[in-house]
Image (cartoon, rainbow, N blue to C red):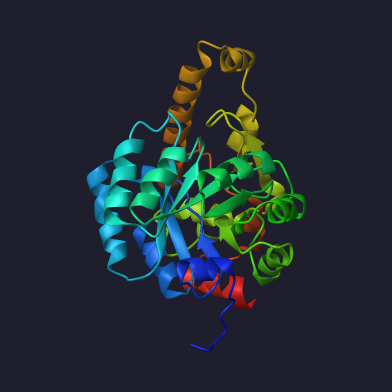
Amino acid sequence: MADDRLPTALTELLNIRYPVIMAPMFLVSNTEMVKSAIESGITGAIPALNYRTTDELRAAIQELKATGGSFGINLIVNKSNFRFEEQLAVCCELRVDFIITSLGSPERTIQEAHNAGVKVFCDVTDLKYALKVEALGADALIAVNNLAGGHAGHLPPEELIPELVKNCSIPVVSAGGVGNRADLDRMLNLGAAGASVGSVFIATNEAPVSAEYKQAIVDYGANDIVMTTKLSGTPCTVINTPYVQEIGTKQNHIQRVLNRNKRLKKWFKAITFIRGMQRLRNAAFDATYKTVWCAGPTIEHVHEIRPVADVVNQLIHV
């Protein structure tokens, strides 16, 4: 392998060749994808929720530890994740390289992870929250911008990244809008230490999702991505299939009222989240007319189903 390293604060932090994290994708990420990512010189993370039991999560971590490469686990740290405590305990016990926190306060995660020698990167969408997690001891910021797939942010990378870099002292990793080397260079030039990249890895040989889901990533483009609140209650990007067009992308009047009710909104959000995740689970592995596929606008760069290594090559060399 030629000495084509792209040294940044992220590559130093994780001892990787290139400053790219294969983003943790609900239902999509698996150990085969992350092992291929490690072999290709980047790192990857898997959502803990991709495993139905803690024993399955433990087995996956042990499998990845055997590679000797850097990898992470994504934890949902709010009350919607009823298995948070046991997932955190396993990550700390087996000492994953890093944890990415999403949708809640990372305070406890940071404390316990650091005690175990595990780094913690925190999803952020604005400066206010970034300063909070930095004060709590986060090791890096995952700057989720408005081009991200899944739960996207509200600020463009051109605004979010420089603001975080200027006001925070820890590495900033851009999440959203990277599908090739030009996109990666753009984020690095804005001051990011690297990029978290997800959607372009869905249509890979190693991904466990259905052939129909992968083909949709190939067939649709950036203009086919829409935002919906029907899946989890939080805005989420999906492919605008005929079924999505039919059901719409906004919650109905009753759902909006429940979402604002002080006493009921916590339970309504939890139920909405669980139902939405089940809908995504069904769609990922068994395509029907009533299919909802999660993806971001970088699918514009996907023109075929290919190995993870080829996607990394496009990110680094093309």
Identify whether 296 is placed above or below 275.
below
Left or right side of 284 for 116: left
Question: Residue at image x 53%, y 47%?
Answer: 122
| Residue 160 makes an appearance in the image | yes
Quarter holding residue 38:
bottom left
Left or right side of 202 for 191: right
- Measured from the top left, where is residue 170 in percent x and y? 59, 57
Which residue is nearer to you in this view: 268 or 8?
8
Quarter holding residue 75:
top left
Left or right side of 299 for 13: left
Identify whether 205 is placed above or below 85.
below
- Measured from the top left, where is residue 293 in percent x and y? 53, 44
Question: Residue at image x 53%, y 32%?
Answer: 231
Quarter holding the C terminus? bottom right
Which residue is nearer to you in this view: 242 or 34?
34
- Measured from the top left, where is residue 78 in percent x and y? 45, 32
Question: Residue at image x 51%, y 48%?
Answer: 137
Question: Residue at image x 73%, y 67%?
Answer: 189
Identify whether 245 is placed above or below 113.
above
Which residue is nearer to you in this view: 201 or 20?
20
- Taking the view exactly as shown, the residue that stands out farthest to the right is 159
- Measured from the top left, where is residue 195 in percent x and y? 60, 61
Which residue is nearer to you in this view: 64 or 256?
64
- Taking the view exactly as shown, the residue that stands out farthest to the bottom is 2
| Residue 286 makes an appearance in the image | no
